Amino acid sequence: MKVPEHLHEAQTAEPVRHLYRERLGGEPTAIGYAPGRIEVIGNHTDYNGGSVLGAAVDMGIHVAAGLREDSQCRLASAGYEAQVVVPLNAISPRSGAESWANYSLGIAHTLLAEGYPVTNGFQLATASTLPSGAGMSSSAALELATASALAALFGFELDRATLARIGRRTENEFVGVPCGILDQGVSAFGAEDHLVHIDCLTETFRQVPMPSGCQFWIFNSNQKHSLVESRYADRHRECGEAFALLQKTSPEAACLARIDPEIVRQQREALGDVRYRRALHITQENQRVAQAIAALEAGDLPALGRLLTASHESSRRLFENSVPALDFLVGQVIAQPGVFGARLTGGGFGGAVMALTDERFAAQQGSAAVERAFADRFEIYPTIFHCRAGAGATTLLHPAIG
């Protein structure tokens, strides 16, 4: 008999319960969970008003929460020895060794700013099964798990769309990353054996069934990226500049992603080389998302795979957010039997590659061949994950039900 998914996740919450007891004392009264995500296709289209397609994975972050008798916010994490303590009425971004706490502190700050009743000091413990810096959005998972835990702790409701929006606002305004709603939206709306399609212009979400017989593999290059310190903000600015120029000839356009690529080609000289390549990537990538959904609905996995690989080539050549390690991984992966396609996943500039495969890839030990080739080239082993599409953010422990 299949174990219900919420019971499976409750069982995996034991490490965060143990951490809470050990580092903070007592028992938590609320536990939130949120998964990481794979960006299947739609690279950097989210903040450009386009569409994206992603999958929540069956790995994620648990946040255990409890009330305090004072007005302090005390945070502990399995990944860091030192705790972070901040007054509830003076939450501000931390720096240096305490910067890991910004995603949870930022959620509390956003909830307070929006009038939610976070009325008392609290303490949080965080435990993760996600690889940090691998392009699976551990930051969004931490934001949504924290919001779920605090909502349960203080007795208010957050629907999935609100949960995603609060996470995105936190990332933009408190953490300082000008991201769209892809990461938070997929983590919030994930469902087993489904992908999540997001229209980022209207911020609407729908779940798209996955055909049977396909699998996801993640190849973490172990060349970690940091979106705050990387060129992500540069790409955001370049896209904004391109859109401002294109609006002169396409004043009806609501956003960059909705402009026809042919118009971008016509305006190549006016845009200049860099803005032209950024705009062409975004406009073509948005079209690839629509084509990918059509391929999914037709059960045409080879067509979907070709779109994934084309997306990576566009990221490499036009958007320039790939790196040699990711390009090498894609080349090695797509040469293996049973692989439909592969591409970088996430913001880029390091991180991981995602591959869509069938059962032959595992049966013929394709991952081992990729691992050996990568180690020979870069003198470091990639970390490889075989994952499935899983459920979205949820509350596992609620004070009212124990």
Image (cartoon, rainbow, N blue to C red):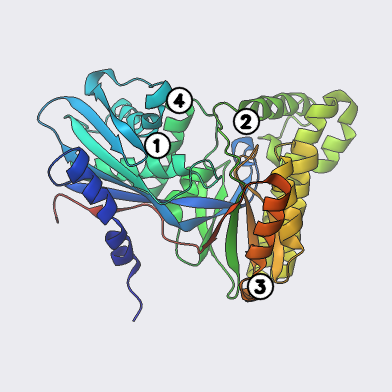
Q: Are marks 1 and 4 in contact (CB under 8 Å)?
A: no
**Label located before the other in sequence (2 or 4):** 4
Q: Which residue is mark 2?
A: 232
User: How many other residues sit within 10 Å of disc 4, few (<14), some (14-19) or many (≥20)?
Assistant: few
Q: Secondary structure at mark 4?
A: helix
Q: Secondary structure at mark 3?
A: loop
Which numbered tag is attached to residue 173?
A: 4
Residue 41 x %, y %: 65, 52
Three-letter amino acid code at disc 2?
Answer: Tyr
User: Image quadrant for the N terminus?
Assistant: bottom left
- Toward which corner of the image does residue 86 lie, by quadrant? top left
Q: Secondary structure at mark 2?
A: helix
Three-letter amino acid code at disc 1?
Answer: Ile
Q: Which residue is mark 1?
A: 166
**Label located before the other in sequence (1 or 4):** 1
Query: Is 269 placed left or right of 256 in the picture?
Result: right
Of residue 8 and residue 47, the one placed in the foreground of this image is 8
What is the C-alpha distance between the residues marked 4 and 3? 40 Å
